[in-house]
């Protein structure tokens, strides 16, 4: 259920968007669940109009799916999906870090990364929405810094899936602090223009994130199986 407490003092559509986005990213709205406008409107104490507007925006961002004759759904991924996505990410993100290190004479680019890392470090375990946005922004900055338009196009194609995964990964024991350290180490290698090291650290970072996500999904499936058996 979506919490009314997550609604801020902005426009009604923005309020609905913020509440729904947070509920999806933090899995209060479970993967695969159907998003019924009437039910969401009742949960949030809003009319259907801002809910529909928020769902449309979230669909454009890839955080919800719209299926004709079925309506809106929260995207659902299995372990096989994760293995495919993270095998691709490991290659793409590693190459992005390598190319960014080779072009690390751009002071504005380095300053942007440094500011991002400072904000990441300030995020606590109860600020996963903010951390997740900063995490994705860090990677997006590297994609753009690669100056490789095809790499940017491929990476951008799965950025919404990546954002959906960040919060559950960060909840796995030790991953939030480890991720911050891995980002910082990647930055240090880029500043030193050590392209080989930057690529190696980034590939390891993505690999560890993928392992954490698979562990999370397998744990969720096991809990679901136990719950289902207890109801028989």
Image (cartoon, helix red, strand yellow):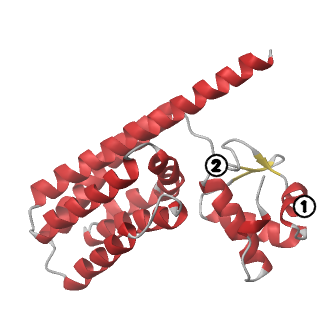
Secondary element at tag 2: loop
Q: Position of residue 143 (x, y in %)?
A: 32, 65
Image quadrant where residue 231 sits: top right
Image x and y of residue 155, in percent: 39, 58
Nearer to me, 41 or 155: 41
> Can I make out residue 56 in this image?
no
Give the x, y percent position of residue 232. 80, 14
Residue matched to label 1 = 42
- 114 on left or right of 125: left
- Is residue 56 positioned above or below 30 on the image? below
Going 12% across and 55% down the picture, which residue do you hit? 197
In which quadrant of the rendered view does residue 136 lie?
A: bottom left
Q: Where is mark 2, residue-wise?
A: 27
192 left or right of 160 in image? left
The first of marks 1 and 2 along the sequence is: 2
Q: Is residue 138 above or below residue 162?
A: below
Q: Secondary structure at mark 1?
A: helix
Q: Is residue 159 visible?
A: yes
User: Against 161, is 11 above or below?
Assistant: below
């Amino acid at each position: 259920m979506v919490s009314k407490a997550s609604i801020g003092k902005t426009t009604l559509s923005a309020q609905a968007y913020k509440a729904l986005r947070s509920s999806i990213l933090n899995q209060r709205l479970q993967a695969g669940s159907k998003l019924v406008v009437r039910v969401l409107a009742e949960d949030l104490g809003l009319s259907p109009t801002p809910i529909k507007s928020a769902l449309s925006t979230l669909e454009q961002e890839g955080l919800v799916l719209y299926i004709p004759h079925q309506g809106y759904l929260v995207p659902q991924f299995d372990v096989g999906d994760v293995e495919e996505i993270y095998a691709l990410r490991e290659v793409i993100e590693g190459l992005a870090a390598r190319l960014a290190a080779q072009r690390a004479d751009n002071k504005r680019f380095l300053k942007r990364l440094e500011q991002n890392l400072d904000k990441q470090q300030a995020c606590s375990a109860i600020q996963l929405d903010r951390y997740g946005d900063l995490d994705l922004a860090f990677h997006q900055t590297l994609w753009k810094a690669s100056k490789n338009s095809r790499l940017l196009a491929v990476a951008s194609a799965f950025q919404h899936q990546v954002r959906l995964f960040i919060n559950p990964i960060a909840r796995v024991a030790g991953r939030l602090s480890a991720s911050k350290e891995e980002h910082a180490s990647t930055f240090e290698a880029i500043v030193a223009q050590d392209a080989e090291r930057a690529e190696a650290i980034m590939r390891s970072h993505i690999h560890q994130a993928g392992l954490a996500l698979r562990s999370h999904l397998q744990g969720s499936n096991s809990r679901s199986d136990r719950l289902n058996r207890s109801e028989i």
